[in-house]
Amino acid sequence: MVRTLANLPLDGGCIVFNFTNTVNTWLQIPDFDYLKDYRDLLAWSEKVNLLDRKRLKLIEAYLETDERNGDRVFKKLIRMRELLHSFFSTIAKGNSPGADQVKSFNAVLAQAHSMIKITIVSGETKVVFVDREVSLEEPLWKIVHSAYEILTEANFDRIRECPGCGWLFLDTSKNGKRRWCNMQVCGSNDKALRYYY
């Protein structure tokens, strides 16, 4: 099967892990990256419902006026993807992230959370990141906020790393024994290897 963003599995269980899982493997040098430029990031954002259609259109229109900044922000997002994978991979292995990792994460978290605005409508609180302003970094803020939610709300024992590809996922299975990002892909590959060898 040809790899495309359209058929990228969403096995992470949360926004941040679906973001880190946009390369085909973390266990070796990836030979395929689902995100090649900022426009791919927007397509991924739509796929995972990171931003509503109206926001996406506004950011897309803004990108047309500032492609160079789009390239800069995209590179920043890719660096953040590497940091987030390393950060949560360490947790999945039962260890604590290093001081430098935590410092880097906190710097981006502080920026993201400085953009949060709260609205309350009919007794319901809604978290938004901008009002009328448009920023190419908005997807990054939402991804980092997802990471924050996992760090503050999830059981660390349920943060897992697939032994087949290195993808991260939140184990929401009843017995907490999920091993693979996707049983039909990495799980089947492992079974086939054990069968033949």
Image: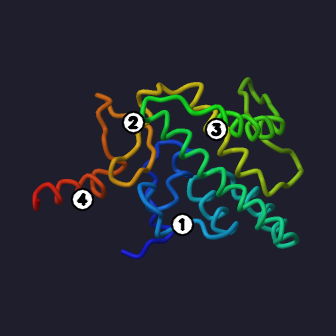
Compare residues 53 and 194 and report the one nearer the observer: 194
For label 1, the SS is loop
Q: What residue is shown with label 4?
A: 189
Amino acid at dot 3: Gln
| Marks 3/1: CA–CA distance | 24 Å
| Marks 4/3: CA–CA distance | 32 Å
Q: What residue is shown with label 2?
A: 171
For label 4, the SS is helix
Q: Earlier in the sequence, mark 3 or mark 2?
A: 3
Amino acid at dot 2: Asp
Q: Earlier in the sequence, mark 3 or mark 1?
A: 1
> Which residue is farthest bottom?
2
Other-residue count near label 4 (Cα within 10 Å), few / some / many at <14 / 14–19 / ≥20: few
Of the 4 image quadrants, the one containing the N terminus is: bottom left
Q: Give the residue at x 17% y 54%.
A: 191
Lateral position of residue 38 relative to residue 34, left or right: right
Which label was assigned to residue 111? none
Which label was assigned to residue 101? 3
Amino acid at dot 1: Tyr
Lateral position of residue 93 relative to residue 137, left or right: left
Determine contact: label 3, label 1, CB under 8 Å.
no
- x and y percent of residue 34 in the render? 54, 66
For label 3, the SS is helix
For label 2, the SS is loop
- x and y percent of residue 138 in the render? 76, 50
